[in-house]
Amino acid sequence: MRFSPEPTWPCPACSKGAMRIKDSRLSHTPAGDLAKRRRRCCSKCGFSVTTYEIPAETYRKAMAPAQAAEQITKIRKILEAAE
Ligand SMILES: [Zn+2]
């Protein structure tokens, strides 16, 4: 089985370069979940970002409170409009 090369994406700062991986190691997210931490750097302008690769289930759990808060805000707006 062959694995495809590490995916990259265009630089969000200059949109000319490609975000290349500078450093990669096993780490934890700010919330404490195990994650693959990568330092990515633009090949043209040097813009850099840190990304964390986590399992989808961990991501869903982390996003659940934010989504619940968003739902409450939507419902509140509907109720306020109905008053
Ligand atoms: Zn760039």
Image (cartoon, rainbow, N blue to C red):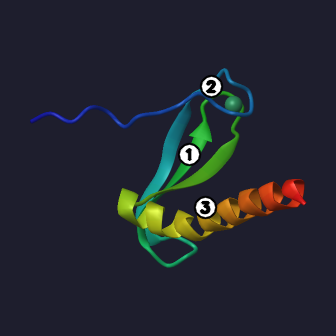
Local packing at callout 3 (Cα closer than 10 Å; few below 14, some 14-19, many 20+) is few
Mark 2, ligand 1, within 8 Å: the answer is yes
Q: Are marks 2 and 1 in contact (CB under 8 Å)?
A: no
Q: Ligand 1 quadrant? A: top right
> Which mark is in front, 3 or 2?
3
The reply to whether discs 1 and 3 touch (Cβ–Cβ < 8 Å) is: no
Q: Which numbered disc, 3 or 2, marks the residue that appears first in the sequence? A: 2
Task: Tell me the quarter of the image containing the N terminus.
Answer: top left
Gap between marks 1 and 3, in whole Å?
28 Å
Residue bearing mark 2: 17
The image quadrant that residue 72 belongs to is bottom right
The circle on residue 67 is 3
Give residue 40's mark.
1
Question: Circle 1: is it few (<14), some (14-19), or many (20+) Cα within 10 Å?
Answer: many
- Farthest residue in the bottom direction? 32
Of 13 and 76, which appears nearest the observer?
76
Q: Circle 2 sits in a helix, a strand or a loop, which is it?
A: loop
**Residue shown at 66% from the left, 27% from the top:** 44
Q: Residue at x 21, y 36 (%)?
A: 3
Give x and y (percent) for residue 28. 47, 73
Marks 3 and 2 sit apart, C-alpha to C-alpha, by: 34 Å
Residue name at image x 44 percent, y 70 percent: 27
Residue type of the residue flagged with mark 3 = Gln
